[in-house]
Image (tube, rainbow, N blue to C red):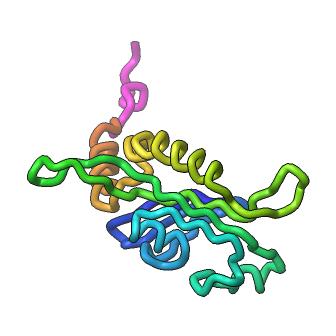
């Protein structure tokens, strides 16, 4: 399961790998998550291997077996230049292999979709205001501001005695 966030400046979606802790990046329109973002639509795949959009590369290299996939867009409302409110996709929640009550891998149902859509609507504005979506320009500008605020020397290092 992953949360993919949009990096518009690089035209990518990025996530942190749960096993490695490394940042993973994909083109923002690639794969199931990329299609979910591009179309701003829920994608519910009951059998990944029967769906041509599913890339089996990771499964083959790890021995893992992806069965079901649910991808939900994370959105915020944003005003355009004409002050018209529009929905902007800022990320994707991607769930894989639903575990049913009996412990078996199952399919995602309408109730699962409704729960995850509610969760995505809740976290969208919080993610947007968290700083995780900073563009490179904003990050470098923020770094400049931080560096300006840093003292160059401490009073105790100036040889002053108090």
Question: Residue at the spot x=61%, y=54% of the render?
Answer: 110
Along the line of sight, which residue is nearer the eye, 106 or 54? 106
- Specify the farthest residue to the front: 110
Residue 43 occupies quadrant: bottom right
Measuring from the top left, give residue 16's x and y in whole percent. Answer: 60, 60
- Please give left or right for residue 161 compared with residue 61 in the image: left
Along the line of sight, which residue is nearer the eye, 149 or 82? 82
Can residue 20 be seen?
no
Task: Quarter of the image for the C terminus: give it.
Answer: top left
- Report if residue 120 lies within the magenta region: no
Can residue 15 be seen?
yes
- What segment carries the magenta color? 152-162
- Please give left or right for residue 33 compared with residue 18 in the image: left
Residue 62 occupies quadrant: bottom right
Measuring from the top left, give residue 113's x and y in whole percent. Answer: 59, 53
Residue 135 occupies quadrant: bottom left
Above or below residue 56? Residue 23 is: above
- Specify the farthest residue to the right: 102
- Please give left or right for residue 127 compared with residue 32 in the image: left
Q: Main secondary structure of the magenta part?
A: loop
Question: Residue at the spot x=75%, y=73% of the render?
Answer: 66
Task: Quarter of the image for the N terminus: give it.
Answer: bottom right
Question: Residue at the spot x=60%, y=87% of the render?
Answer: 52
């Amino acid at each position: 399961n992953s949360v993919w966030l949009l990096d518009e400046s690089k035209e990518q979606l990025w996530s942190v790998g749960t096993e490695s802790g490394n940042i993973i990046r994909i083109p923002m329109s690639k794969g199931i998550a990329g299609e979910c973002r591009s179309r701003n639509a829920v994608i519910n795949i009951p059998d990944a291997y029967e769906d041509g959009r599913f890339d089996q590369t990771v499964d083959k290299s790890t021995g893992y077996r992806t069965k079901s996939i649910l991808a939900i867009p994370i959105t915020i409302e944003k005003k355009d230049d004409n002050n018209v409110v529009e929905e902007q996709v800022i990320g994707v929640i991607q769930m894989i292999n639903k575990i049913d009550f009996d412990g078996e891998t199952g399919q995602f149902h309408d109730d699962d979709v409704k729960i995850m859509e509610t969760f995505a609507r809740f976290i969208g504005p919080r993610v947007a205001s968290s700083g995780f979506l900073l563009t490179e320009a904003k990050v470098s500008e923020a770094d400049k501001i931080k560096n300006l605020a840093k003292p160059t020397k401490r009073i105790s290092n100036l040889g002053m005695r108090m």
